[in-house]
Amino acid sequence: MKKYLKSFWNWLKDLTTLDESAAELYGEAKSRAKEVKKEFDDVKKAAKNVVNQSKDVVDAVKGKKKRGRKPNYKTKTNNSKRKKKWN
């Protein structure tokens, strides 16, 4: 009788580890899928940036001006050369 109980217990124990391991695998697969999605979004953004940069290269070859920020035409005054009045 003891042999049958022991074998039944081992069988039952094996079943629970299968369920637990299946749940762990599901959780791991789900988290990996989220990480893959994040990385895919990053790659997509980088690819868009590459396309925009390649357009700039083509425009440069054609002789067009560089796109981007507009230059700052305001001149800064340098007041350090002024003579200071001391009382």
Image: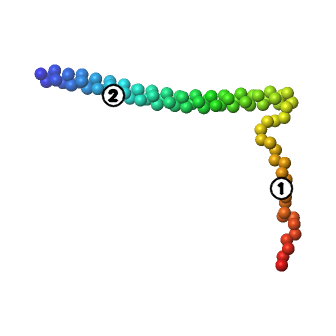
Q: Residues within 10 Å of mark 2 (few under 14, many from 20)?
A: few
In percent of width and height, residue 65 lies at: 84, 35
Q: Secondary structure at mark 1?
A: loop
Here the colouring is rainbow
Residue in the picture at 84% in, 48% down: 73
Under mark 1, the amino acid is: Lys
Q: Secondary structure at mark 2?
A: helix
Q: Are marks 2 and 1 in contact (CB under 8 Å)?
A: no
Residue in the picture at 70% in, 29% down: 50
From the viewer's perspective, is 85 left or right of 50? Answer: right
Q: Nearer the viewer, residue 77 or 32?
A: 77
Residue in the picture at 60% in, 32% down: 42
Residue placed furthest toward the left: 1
For label 1, the residue is 76
How many angstroms separate mark 2 from mark 1 (CA)?
A: 70 Å
Under mark 2, the amino acid is: Glu
In percent of width and height, residue 45 lies at: 64, 31
Q: How many marks?
A: 2
Q: Quadrant of the N terminus?
A: top left
Residue in the picture at 83% in, 30% down: 60
Residue placed furthest toward the bottom: 87
> Is residue 75 placed above or below 35 in the rendered structure?
below
In percent of width and height, residue 16 lies at: 29, 26
Q: Residues within 10 Å of mark 1 (few under 14, many from 20)?
A: few
From the viewer's perspective, is 59 left or right of 46? Answer: right
Q: Nearer the viewer, residue 70 or 58?
A: 70
Q: Quadrant of the C terminus?
A: bottom right
> Is residue 84 placed above or below 58 in the rendered structure?
below
In percent of width and height, residue 30 lies at: 45, 28
| The disc label shown at residue 20, or none | 2
